Amino acid sequence: MILVTGGTGLVGSHLLVELIKRNHSVKAIYRNEKKLNAVKNVFNYYFDDADTYFDKIEWIKADITDIPSLEKAFLNTDIVYHCAAIVSFNEKDYPVMRKTNIEGTANMVNLAIANKIKKFCYVSSIATIEKNSNPNSLITEENEWNKESNNYGYAITKYGAEMEVWRGTQENLDVVIVNPGVILGSGFWQSGPGELFSKMYQNFKFYTEGITGFVGVKDVVKAMIKLTESNIKNERFILVSENISFKELFFKIADAFGRKRPSVKVDKTLSNIAWRVEKIKSFLTGKPPLITKHSANASLSKYRYDSSKIKKAVDFNFETIDETIKDVCVDFLKDREQNG
């Protein structure tokens, strides 16, 4: 039996689809019943009779920060995919990120050890990998964490979570960690990378020339399964299909939608103004800022990641970003047509 956390999120929902397609027995935890509808919508992208396949999942109401509810979820479990996390670059969310990302992962690891889980797959992020000073050199899994340069809340809590997972290896828990780049996938159009597609469809005007690694969610979940089902243990893997600029990504999405390409380049000066204005607006309205200092800086930075380790380890091939964007845009338009 396989247990999935974060099943109502982007990676978790697409992972559930792939596991069900492979006829695995699967259970997943959830906190809010309303979010189950988003998962059903993801199943609609893959199956004509989505409800039939969705109903094969055993859903358990639980929270990774609540040990009693988790204990029930771990009963008769062999494999764990831990996808649950809070992603935010808002300073105000740091305490809740620490509780969920670090303490929640510690709970997962402790219960995995107690229940003698055979394999534990953790979804981390490239945010935990130290960047190179030379923007043209490739970043690998060997780059060690640097608390001075990775001193923002999300990276700190994901690194803390990784440390909990590595702790588990000292108590005979077999683990694999994946470090995906920016994940592009269908569904969840109003948050995370999914929001990029919504904005580009609405003729978003701005772009930056920062560079980072991007990957399709389908590749992320297939790599997770392949690693978990292999004999590989106690290693981590960068998952990046291509390193491209935000400008190139935005242009590709606009072209796929047949929309006008963004035309306003955001430089450092404009970026600094934007995040400061958003900080003031957030203070006055109490709403989270659309842009933070970190996200503004990240959109201008140029980092390139090396995925050769996963390719060699399990003979893995990534979809091109063009293929990923095409598929995601098709699903976006289907949703728009159905929902009006």
Image (cartoon, helix red, strand yellow):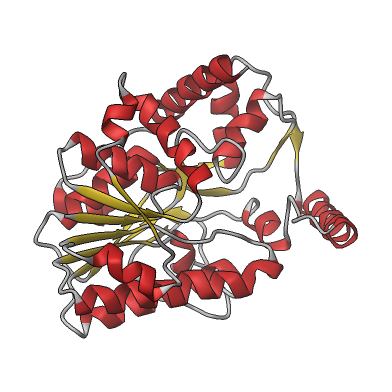
Q: Residue at x 27, y 75 (%)?
A: 111
Q: Residue at x 82, y 51 (%)?
A: 274
The residue lying toward the viewer, choosing from 248 and 191, is 191
In the image, is 17 to the left or to the right of 159? left
In the image, is 314 to the left or to the right of 278? left
Q: Where is residue 257 in the image (x, y as percent from the top left)?
A: 57, 18
Q: Decide if residue 247 is in sight here.
A: no
Q: Decide if residue 125 is in sight here.
A: yes
Q: Position of residue 68 (x, y in %)?
A: 37, 74
Q: Is residue 106 above or below residue 339?
A: below
Q: Quadrant of the C terminus?
A: top right
Q: Is residue 64 above or below residue 229?
A: below
Q: In this view, does 174 lie above or below 332?
A: below
The residue lying toward the viewer, choosing from 181 and 133, is 181
Farthest bottom residue in view: 170
Q: Position of residue 103 (x, y in %)?
A: 45, 77
The quadrant holding residue 117 is bottom left
Q: How many marks?
A: 0
The quadrant holding residue 10 is top left
Q: Quadrant of the N terminus?
A: bottom left
The residue lying toward the viewer, choosing from 5 and 127, is 5
Q: Is residue 96 above or below residue 147?
A: above
Q: Where is residue 159 in the image (x, y as percent from the top left)?
A: 45, 73
Q: Which residue is drawn at 82% across and 49% down?
A: 270
Q: Which residue is drawn at 29% across and 66% down?
A: 72
In the image, is 252 to the left or to the right of 128? right
